[in-house]
Image (tube, grey):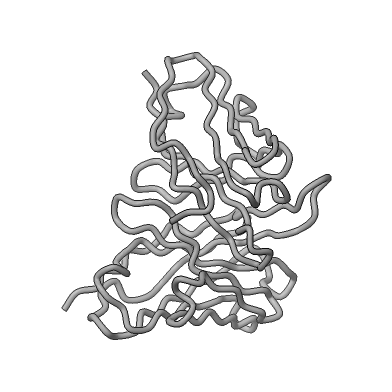
Amino acid sequence: QVQLQESGPGLVKPSETLSLTCAVSGYSISSGYYWGWIRQPPGKGLEWIGSIYHSGSTYYNPSLKSRVTISVDTSKNQFSLKLSSVTAADTAVYYCARDYYGSGSYYWVVYFDYWGQGTLVTVSS
Amino acid sequence: SSELTQDPAVSVALGQTVRITCQGDSLRSYYASWYQQKPGQAPVLVIYGKNNRPSGIPDRFSGSSSGNTASLTITGAQAEDEADYYCNSRDSSGNHLRVFGGGTKLTVL
């Protein structure tokens, strides 16, 4: 069974960098798939932050691209998120998830099949 | 703003059928995936691809697609289906970008 677990500080000061790690068990990151970060501000919807392929190729939400870095450490079977210059608007529950992208019978197929439980990050001084 | 548009709220009587829709240009080339999220919990994948259910998802959940619209249908809605539902796909730019719909709050009456 694939499991993901987010970890990192629950409180970050404005203008500082938010750093989270997602530990993966039950599946080797180097075997394939993309690996993504999604966030959800309190009371709001889901927002995709970005994804990384097991080889290291990254794709970011254009609205966050200038502040986001996602990296992968296959030796530890984990991937990480860094979001710089945070403000109160970055307060959210942050999820990591396994991200599938491939061809289907007629269309391309995309989905996030395994999710972490989520971790609340509050930006406040 | 989201490139995938969902109705904010939908209601259904217990045991009846409800359809939740998701509209976007990218849905002409990409299947939508659907997620159920209950309060305080992580989203759960319920439909992916043409009409596939992960293990453990009841067969009352089904998916379909036509033109720029994807639909999630719950046939015989149960009280435990009351939740927020999100669609997800690629954006319409042709890049490797993912996008979520704004979500639909389903109320089971």
Q: Residue at x 26, y 78 (%)?
A: A12
Q: Is residue B78 above or below residue B49?
A: above
Q: How many marks?
A: 0
Q: Residue at x 34, y 48 (%)?
A: B40
Q: Residue at x 47, y 21 (%)?
A: B78
Seen from the viewer's position, the closer of residues A67 and B57 is A67
Residue farthest along the right direction in this orientation: A105
In the image, B104: left or right of B96?
Answer: left
In the image, B3: left or right of B82?
Answer: right
Q: Is residue B23 above or below residue A116?
A: above
* Residue A79, image x, y percentages: 55, 76
Residue farthest along the left direction in this orientation: A125
Q: Residue at x 27, y 75 (%)?
A: A87
Q: Is residue B37 above or below residue B107?
A: below
* Residue A19, image x, y percentages: 40, 80
* Residue B12, image x, y percentages: 43, 20
Q: Is residue A49 above or below residue B1?
A: below
* Residue A72, image x, y percentages: 59, 80
In the rendered image, the quadrant that contains the C terminus of chain A is bottom left
In the image, A44: left or right of A116?
Answer: left
In the rendered image, the quadrant that contains the N terminus of chain A is bottom right
User: Where on the picture, by quarter, is residue A6?
Assistant: bottom left
User: Where on the picture, by quarter, is residue B87?
Assistant: top right
In the image, A30: left or right of A1?
Answer: right
